[in-house]
Image (tube, grey):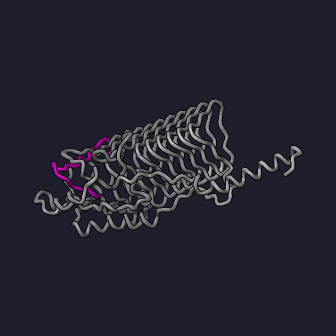
Amino acid sequence: MKRTNILLITTMFSFVSSAHAGFIPLDLLDTELNDKSTYAALYVNLGAGSTLGGNMQGFAPITTGVNSVVGGNVTAGTAVTSGAGSSIGGYIQAGTTAITGVGASVGGSIFSGTTAGTGANSIVGGDIEAGGLYTAGSGALVSGNVNDQLELVPGYIAPAVINQKGQLDIVQATLDQLGVTEGSTNLDITFGLVNETLLAGVYDSLNYLTIRAGKTLTLDGLGVDGDFLFNIHNYLDFAAGSKVELINFTDNSNVIWNVIGDAVGSSGYMQAAADVSIRGFIFANGYVNTGDRTTLNGVGNSCGGAFSVNDYVLFGADNIVGGLGCDTYFTDVTDVPEPRTAIFLLGLAGLLFSRYRKQRKSQGHPS
């Protein structure tokens, strides 16, 4: 999926589709976001029975529905709640509470700023580190160590998520500017009334962009590396049963939907009805809301995904966002937090010794 510097240099001297081959910057996102397939300034909600192949991050709460599957990590500025029978392949990091449902599983560790709880017959493959009290349901299993009430330990710092609005504002502006530097083709508001086919390049929708019910937008890569960029100045809408299909594509190509929302009366949202199939990656100034049985996949091994700069991301029931084991977006940065235990081991030892002395004193032993 990922282009290398050598490939970029080769592309510069290629005579095939040279105008629009590989023009999207590889360093578009920094290390905080370039391994995420989902980010929202507000909440993220993954519907019941849905599967998301990459990593999720929300500045506010994240909720995964009943029997949902997340292939990667879940990081929230506040609470993380996973539904009954759900599965998270990586770790959970929550600024406040972290709760897993009955029969849920977490492949990695759970880090919570306040309380943590695991439902009956649930499984945690790593450690649990909680600022507050940890509560385990009947039959719950934790493979690693449990350290709770860490907020009492001197030096303890709760997990945190940074609001990424500043970075994402720059990303959207950068993508919009590519319409000037690369040259763009304007799409009229009647685009999408019938089946459409486009070649690689920058496409500018001065108003809204809608693919109508049952219609297909075909993106033809012509067998060479190339990028498709859609700068949309109002909103992006996929009606029921509409599709985006890729033909003659290479794994080193990209599809980006940049929903800027700078037209009058628009918040820059993206919405999809039921049974929609989308390819690529969505940057939306407003919310992202998909209907039941929506699929959103990237190119090649890429997860694809969606970011909301100022609002929420809501994936409906039985959605598929990327495949399990898919690569995240621009670079392969492994998102593994440093073991937080090292920060407060000394303070923890002091706290345990203090509790030990109090217990002995209450039993009548000399302090």
Q: Residue furthest front?
A: 366
Q: Is residue 178 rendered to the left or right of residue 357?
A: left
The mark tally for this picture is 0
Q: Of 100 and 168, which appears nearest the observer?
A: 100
Q: Is residue 144 rendered to the left or right of residue 213?
A: right
Q: Of 291 and 331, which appears nearest the observer?
A: 331
In this view, 262 is above or below 257: below
Q: Position of residue 295 (x, y in %)?
A: 37, 41
Q: Position of residue 211 (x, y in %)?
A: 31, 49
Q: Is residue 303 rendered to the left or right of residue 100?
A: left
Name the residue: 56% across, 37% down.
143
Whether residue 224 appears in magenta in the rendering, the answer is yes
Please provide the residue range marked out in magenta. Answer: 212-229
Q: Position of residue 130 (x, y in %)?
A: 63, 48
Q: Residue furthest left?
A: 15
- Quadrant of res 229: bottom left
Q: Is residue 355 rendered to the left or right of residue 147?
A: right
Q: Position of residue 236 (x, y in %)?
A: 37, 54
Whether residue 194 appears in magenta in the rendering, the answer is no
Name the residue: 16% across, 63% down.
12
Name the residue: 42% across, 42% down.
52
Residue 196 makes an appearance in the image: no
Q: Of 29 and 321, which appears nearest the observer?
A: 29
In this view, 322 is above or below 59: above
Name the residue: 46% across, 64% down.
165
